[in-house]
């Protein structure tokens, strides 16, 4: 078990992914063939349950695409089940307090970091994968190291207490939701507003100072370039459905006017 996305980012490489919303395993394969580093199966806004996510995660791994997932909520079941079907990292929305983050670690990391439930599931090849063949202590250590827990910074409370949130053992970094964050600041999608710009830059700076991974969503390539210039280690560019739609809209405009 190796999280190639994490390895690249710790080596200082920028990474690029997208949200997975179409619900097609074939699309997941195509994202891997396109050379993306990861996709995020969205169970918060998307219609997917863990059973559906299982097939998408398998397809992603087939072509070297690291499968992440965004959970529905901060709950044991939401976090446990997506790791059990093979997600290599989880994004947890609507985080506000250190106490919530401690719960996230409790649900998502094995002992001694947390209290994740133990079972031989598809995510570990039902314990037939090599890393699960050397005793539970080794299995716990590898799983804790190679799976990511990324609270989503999209609330004012998370923004203001980010330093303490990142000090919680077991948290690997932060995922920035700029649309929700700007809305929480009272300036929806006003990404040129100084307060919004400062907040987004501040989050990256806190992550860098803490030695944590930084991810952010970007709606288009121009936003992605700005985010990389700010120092973000990873940008999630749009979603599969909008990229597909925009590509064919562009072809149609070019060919038919």
Image (tube, helix red, strand yellow):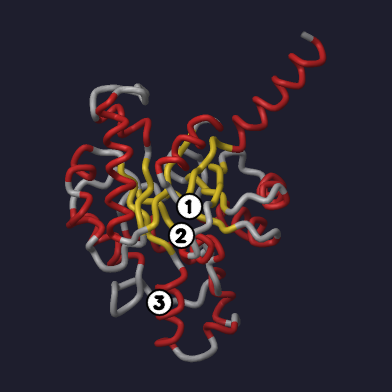
Residue at the image position 30 percent from the left and 34 percent from the top: 181
Where is residue 52? Give x, y as percent: 57, 52
Where is residue 186? Give x, y as percent: 24, 23
Residue underneath mark 2: 89
Q: Which of marks 3 and 1 is nearer the N terminus?
A: 1
In the displayed orientation, state which residue is furthest to the right: 255
How many numbered markers are drawn? 3
Q: Nearer the viewer, residue 7 or 209?
A: 209
Determine which of the numbered discs, if any, sits on residue 157 in the image: none
Residue at the image position 61 percent from the left and 33 percent from the top: 241
Q: Which of marks 3 and 2 is in front?
A: 2
Residue at the image position 46 percent from the left and 35 percent from the top: 226
Q: Is mark 2 on a helix, strand or loop?
A: strand
Q: Which of marks 3 and 2 is nearer the N terminus?
A: 2
In the displayed orientation, state which residue is furthest to the bottom: 134
Q: What element carries label 3?
A: loop
Where is residue 163? Give x, y as percent: 21, 54
Residue underneath mark 3: 118
Q: Earlier in the sequence, mark 1 or mark 2?
A: 1
- Cα–Cα span, label 3 and label 2: 17 Å
Where is residue 44? Give x, y as percent: 42, 42
Question: Quarter-wise, where is residue 251 in the image?
Answer: top right
Q: Are marks 1 and 2 in contact (CB under 8 Å)?
A: yes
Q: Nearer the viewer, residue 96 or 8?
A: 8
Residue underneath mark 1: 69
- Cα–Cα span, label 3 and label 1: 20 Å
């Amino acid at each position: 078990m190796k999280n190639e996305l994490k390895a690249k980012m710790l080596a200082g490489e920028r990474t690029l992914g997208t949200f997975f919303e179409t619900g097609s395993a074939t699309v997941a394969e195509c994202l891997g063939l396109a050379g993306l580093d990861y996709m995020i199966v969205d169970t918060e806004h998307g219609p997917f349950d863990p059973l559906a996510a299982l097939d998408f995660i398998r397809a992603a791994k087939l072509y070297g695409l690291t499968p992440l997932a965004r959970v529905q909520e901060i709950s044991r079941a939401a976090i446990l089940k997506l790791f059990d079907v093979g997600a290599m990292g989880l994004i947890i929305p609507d985080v506000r307090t250190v106490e919530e983050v401690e719960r996230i670690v409790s649900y998502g990391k094995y002992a001694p970091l947390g209290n994740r439930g133990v079972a031989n599931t598809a995510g570990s090849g039902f314990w037939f994968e090599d890393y699960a063949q050397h005793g539970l202590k080794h299995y716990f250590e590898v799983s804790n190291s190679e799976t990511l827990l990324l609270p989503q910074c999209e609330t004012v409370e998370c923004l203001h207490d980010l330093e303490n949130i990142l000090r919680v053992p077991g948290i690997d970094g932060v995922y920035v939701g700029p649309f929700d964050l700007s809305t929480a600041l009272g300036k929806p999608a006003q990404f040129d507003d100084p307060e919004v710009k400062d907040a987004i830059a501040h989050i990256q700076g806190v992550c860098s100072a803490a030695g944590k991974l930084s991810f952010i969503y970007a709606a288009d390539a121009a936003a992605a370039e700005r985010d990389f210039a700010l120092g973000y280690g990873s940008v999630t560019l749009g979603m599969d459905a909008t990229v597909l739609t925009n590509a064919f809209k562009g072809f149609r405009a070019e060919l038919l006017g």
